Amino acid sequence: MLYDYENFKKDIYKLININLSLYKERQMKRRIESLMERKGYHNFEEYFNALKKDDELLRAFVSYLTINVSEFYRNPNQWELFEKHIIPYLLKKYGKSLNIWSAACSTGDEPYTIAMILAKHLPLDQIKIQATDIDEDVLNFAKEGYYSAKSVAGLPKDLLNKHFTKVDNGYQINKDIKRCVDFRKHNLLEDMYPSGIHMIVCRNVVIYFTDEAKDGVYKKFHRAMAKEGVLFIGSTEQIIRAKEIGFEAVDSFFYKRLDVPVF
């Protein structure tokens, strides 16, 4: 029997618990075929057999799947809205002990950005951010906290000077900011979600999921959040049926959790 992409998806799920059927098929299949070709494999069966035997190849595959594109202070106008409008709302609503989750955090640029902006309003020892991703390699990178000059190029100079140390050709984030962020592995499509979250940041990730999977993630976000919590999404995203999924737009790319049952 011909071993095709359907077989490959099933075997990948058994191997690493990543359900490729929940990603947009044409886009994901094309990406994987391109990667296979670059690595010198001619079909899905040959590639899967190699992934089973080679941990390094498998890690590279997971990293490629998760499309780790991130940078500090990406889309500055959104971070300005976060600082000027969302932080005051969160502090007034929940007090100083905020429970923030950066989901699919990639290389850590976004949770560290959140911590640096929050540090203007709160003592560092009161800032605790959960940051999760499916890719262990990017989590290890984030924990190291060493970034290229390109990665931090968009940061306001006051944040760069205050929270980074220039090292060789890049920048090392200071330990006091690193301590604010707890990095852990988490699969948005499979794992249990935390609860009582005041703000979830998940930007430019669900665009790669099928509509059904996307709705499922938003519904689970709704259940994970505290009453009237805030969801911060990416500049390429929009929640089309927001109220059906339990959210209401409050500003560009910011949604408030509605206190309604969501199934």
Image (cartoon, rainbow, N blue to C red):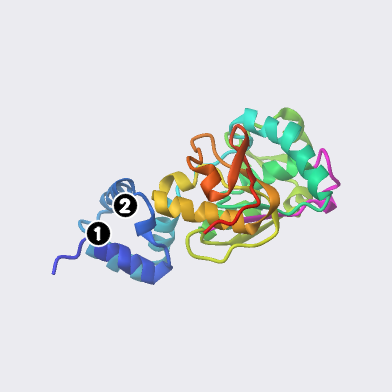
Q: Residue at x 61, y 58 (%)?
A: 223
Residue lying farthest right? Answer: 123
Mark nearest the camera among 2 and 1 is 1
The image quadrant of residue 112 is: top right
Spatial separation of the CA atoms under disc 2 and disc 1: 10 Å
Q: Quadrant of the N terminus?
A: bottom left
Q: Is residue 163 visible?
A: no
Decide which of tag 2 and tag 1 comes sooner along the chain.
Answer: 1
Describe the element under mark 2 as helix, strand or loop: helix
Whether tag 2 and tag 1 are in contact, CB under 8 A, the answer is yes
Q: Nearer the viewer, residue 18 or 138?
A: 18
Q: x%, y% of residue 195?
A: 66, 61
Bounds of the magenta segment? 119-133
Question: Measured along the vertical axis of the image, is residue 39 above or below residue 6?
Answer: above
Q: Is residue 127 magenta?
A: yes
Which residue type carries mark 2?
A: Ile
* Residue matched to label 2: 32
Q: Nearer the viewer, residue 14 or 57?
A: 14
Q: Nearer the viewer, residue 95 or 34?
A: 95
Q: Is residue 100 magenta?
A: no
Q: x%, y% of residue 209?
A: 41, 50
Q: Is residue 212 visible?
A: yes
Q: x%, y% of residue 254?
A: 62, 38
Q: Count how many numbered circles sit on residues in the image.
A: 2
Q: Residue at x 64, y 48 (%)?
A: 258
* Residue matched to label 1: 5
Which residue type carries mark 1?
A: Tyr
Q: x%, y% of residue 105?
A: 58, 50
Residue lying farthest front? Answer: 260
Q: Which mark is residue 75?
A: none
Question: Measured along the vertical axis of the image, is residue 8 above or below residue 141?
Answer: below
Describe the element under mark 1 as helix, strand or loop: helix
